[in-house]
Structures are given as C-alpha cells and as structure tokens.
C-alpha cells in the first residue's frame, strides 16, 4: 500500500488524484497506526518549513515514520516534504529537520525573481529507478524560494538551474526527495510517481 501522509500541510488531493489517474493504489492517512502498514510513503508539503515540521510532530506520526524509515520502507518527500528530510533549514531562522539526509535548506542567493515559479529542467546525475522511462532534461513544475543543499554529492540525483545549479532530486538509501511538484508536472511527473509507487 502507498500512503500519503496527511499532516494538514499542502494540497494532498492533487497528489492523490495524480496517483488515482495512474491507477496506483493509494490512501491518505493521518494516524500513526495507518502508517505502520505502509509499503511506501509519500510525504508532501507546501508552505514554510518550520510550521510543516511542527505539524508533523503534532500529528503523532513522527515516531512511526522514523521506525518505518529505519526499517527500509521507501519514502518520497515532495517540495517542503523533501526539505524536511534534511538536517535543518534557514527559512525564518534556523530550524531542525528530520536529519535523514545530511545537508541544509538554503534560500536562493541571486537577483532572479523569488520564488521560482514554473517549469524547469531536471538534469539526471545518476541512473535510478525513480527515473525509469523519464527522459533526461525533462521539465517539471516548481514553486519554491528555498532549495536543498545536501552535504554529499552522492546524494544528488538531479540538478536544476535557477541562477545557479541546485539539487532538485536527492536520494539516500530508501529515501527520495524532489523539490518540484510531480503531481503538477504532466506525464513526466506521473511517470516518476508511478516509478516510486511500484518500487520493490
């Protein structure tokens, strides 16, 4: 079973609709007990880092998510959900994240319009099951002012450029994170979601 974590952050129904459209079995869950039975976990998120982290704590699901991740259950963080996987974010001060992928979340440092809103390419850095049947340099839909900055280049699966190169897809063991919104990224996004939801 693919579960979408509902911790009151973000528009979950776009994600659920995308999975339904692709014929992928899924359900929204908001209780720890429902997470325990997950085969794969999707952690979405929209808005600011600190409130999202606080909502995740208050949801009562943080402990079981930690258990599932340690047990090797695949997890995909989307947008702010991907940022939460890192050690900390500098958004509105310094705030601790989940610390599952070493690195930080930094604000864009350039003169381009912030947030980045719209389509941007993802340059694949490694072969990975997440990219199966997704062509290199495909466009995905982004909305963000802060970006992932992993400590180790080995954890960077995809790069995008907005003023400079930044990590738009990260991976460590059974964890994946995408800065863009695959559920809003047409066929490439649907394929990427399907790839994750059929991982064995």
Image (cartoon, rainbow, N blue to C red):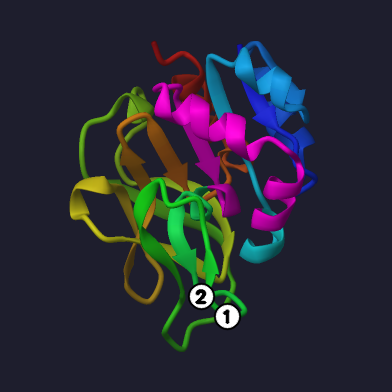
Badge 2: residue crowd in 10 Å (few <14, some 14–19, many ≥20): some
Does residue 192 appear anywhere in the picture? no
Residue at the location (41% across, 38% down)?
A: 176
- The structure residue drawn at horizontal position 65% and vertical position 65%, both measured from the top left corner, is 50
Q: Which residues are magenta?
A: 53-81
Verify CB contact (< 8 Å) between mark 2 and mark 1: yes
Q: Residue at x 57, y 41 (%)?
A: 185
Residue 55 coordinates in the image, percent (x, y): 74, 51
Which image quarter holds the N terminus?
top right
Q: Is residue 58 magenta?
A: yes
Which residue bears the numbered disc 2? Answer: 90
Does the rendering let one see residue 21? yes
Q: Relative to 182, is 26 above or below?
A: above
Query: Does 12 sit above or below residue 26?
Result: below
| Residue 187 in picture, x, y percent from top left | 53, 30
Which residue is under mark 1?
93
C-alpha gap between disc 2 and disc 1: 5 Å
Q: Report the quarter where the C terminus lies.
A: top left
* In this picture, residue 23 sits left or right of residue 138: right
């Amino acid at each position: 079973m693919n579960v979408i974590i509902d911790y009151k952050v973000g528009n979950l129904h776009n994600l659920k609709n995308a999975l339904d459209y692709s014929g992928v079995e899924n359900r929204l869950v908001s209780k720890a007990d429902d997470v325990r039975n997950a085969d794969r976990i999707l952690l979405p998120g929209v808005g600011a880092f600190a409130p999202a982290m606080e909502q995740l704590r208050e949801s009562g699901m943080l402990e079981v998510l930690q258990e599932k991740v340690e047990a090797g259950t695949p997890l995909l963080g989307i947008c702010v959900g991907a940022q939460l996987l890192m050690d900390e974010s500098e958004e509105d001060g310094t705030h601790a994240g989940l610390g599952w992928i070493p690195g930080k979340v930094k604000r864009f440092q350039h003169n381009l319009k912030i947030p980045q809103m719209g389509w941007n390419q993802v340059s694949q850095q490694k072969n990975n099951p997440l990219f199966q049947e997704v062509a290199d340099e495909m466009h995905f839909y982004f909305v963000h002012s802060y970006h992932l900055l992993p400590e180790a280049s080995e954890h960077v699966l995809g790069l995008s450029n907005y003023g400079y190169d930044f990590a738009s897809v990260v991976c460590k063991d059974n964890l994946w994170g995408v800065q863009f919104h695959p559920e809003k990224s047409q066929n490439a996004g649907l394929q990427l979601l399907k790839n994750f939801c059929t991982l064995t």
